[in-house]
Image (cartoon, rainbow, N blue to C red):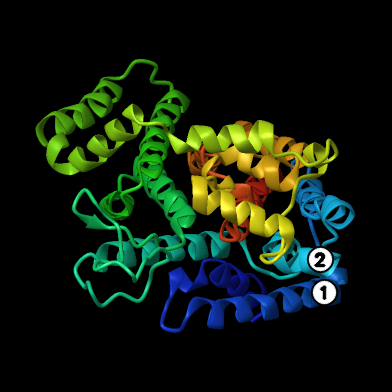
Amino acid sequence: MDYLVVIIPTLVSIRLWSFQAAPEHALWSQVEKALVVALIAVTAWRSKQIKIPQMKFSYKWHILSLFLLSFTSFLPLFYFDNQSPLSSFNTNMHMTYWLVYFAAYSTQISRDDILKLKVFIGIVWALLTIGQQFTYPRVYFFSRANFENEVPFEIRSGIYRYMVQGGYFAMLTSYYAFNQFLCTSQKWYLAILGLMLAAVYCTGTRQMMAVNLASLACLYVAFLWMRGRQTPLKLIALLLTPLFVLALFGETLFGQLLEKTAEEATEDNVRVLSLKFFLFDYWPHWSNFFLGNGVPHYFSEKGIFLRKMEETYGYFASDVGLVGILHYKGVFYVLLSILVVIRGVIAKTTENTLFLNVTFLGILMILPINPVFSTFEFFPHFVLLCILQERSIHERQIKA
């Protein structure tokens, strides 16, 4: 039952796949506050039981450093904005999800158990994302809606964009399924991959589609290279097949997506202006560049100012990827985040665990455009990914 120390925070971080049977702020905000207190208490209580193996390859100090750097922005918020540390913690509670790494090592949860949990979350996410396309207007899992509109959900390329949380787990699930299919040729893994790809398409998110397909292509190339096949015909087929599909069905499948992209390319892109604002214009003090501007309280002077910039100009730190993380957490946090991800990409691997490196690669691809290291649903996924890679490498070292 001590597995619940890992399972509960992970499911709460994705809001049970954005479950909306009760109002979000009335339910999940209170649940998360209770969870944060419990997670800190349990980690402290079980501190003597935390047994991280003495490994040459470990993320222990990286995760601990990221956790501590998450709170450096409290200093400029306190000195320059008169925001109390308690208020700052209230707006940054999700950073305590880093503790899931240490909580996991206080349990007997195995590598296979963690992998099963992540794959389960990914498959449920896919079923909900696809299934709710056919149940509208009866939908209970979503994170983006505007009920002032006649149709509260954005429709893009003929699909409803519910933005169900848990997509990071689905990306890993797709890489795992493809990796296992290449290793075993069992077709049910191909079925899981097809389910994941269909669900990713149903998000209507171009960045997610591009990163997913690019990562799968990299996985295939790396797998063939590890098998010693330098220029196989299969690689040519892999590249030509999607081009053939796009030639026949591209307008039907991606017409509205491509049209929207073209429209954005011909207009003043607000994201470029937003990037300029957060990268060059908004630094109240030079120390903020190193410590971060932090997340101001909703009703504070800085909070009101930033909200005005959002409403008036559409400037969102969440729209500018790494620059958004730099804005929130400072340059030290950004550099360490990049270092950890690159370490995961280049770690030694085998044919069976190649999907782990590719998952890190996908994160590296999306970092410039998505501030993943400042979103609450990302942390449990990331620390469990780190543990999966640690234990995979450790098991190989023991067998060797």
Numbered label attached to residue 50:
2
Towards the viewer: 122 or 364: 364
Towards the viewer: 265 or 176: 265
Using the rendered image of the protein, determine whether residue 188 is visible from the camera's viewpoint: no
Task: Identify the residue shown where x is 62% and y is 31%.
Answer: 346
Name the kind of residue labelled 1 in the image.
Arg
* Residue 235 placement (x, y as % from top left): 30, 24
Q: In which quarter of the image is the N terminus?
A: bottom right
Towards the viewer: 195 or 163: 163
- Identify the image quadrant of residue 104: bottom right
- The secondary element bearing badge 1 is classed as loop
Q: How many C-alpha atoms fall within 10 Å of the one at disc 1: few (<14), some, or many (≥20)?
A: some
Position of residue 221 relative to residue 124, above or below, is above
Task: Identify the residue shown where x is 85% and y is 60%.
Answer: 82
The single residue placed furthest to the left in the displayed view is 248
- Please state if 119 lies on the left or on the right of 242 as rendered: right
How many angstroms separate mark 1 from mark 2 (CA)? 7 Å
Position of residue 179 relative to residue 348, above or below, is below
Residue under numbered circle 1: 46
* Residue 330 placement (x, y as % from top left): 75, 41
Q: State yes or no: discs 1 and 2 in contact (Cβ < 8 Å).
A: yes
Task: Identify the residue shown where x is 32% and y is 27%.
Answer: 266
Q: How many C-alpha atoms fall within 10 Å of the one at disc 2: few (<14), some, or many (≥20)?
A: some
- Identify the image quadrant of residue 125: bottom left
- Please state if 40 lies on the left or on the right of 191 as rendered: right
Position of residue 79 relative to residue 282, above or below, is below
Position of residue 302 relative to residue 338, above or below, is below
- Identify the image quadrant of residue 308: bottom right
- The secondary element bearing badge 2 is classed as loop
Using the rendered image of the protein, determine whether residue 359 is visible from the camera's viewpoint: yes
Q: Quadrant of the C terminus?
A: top right
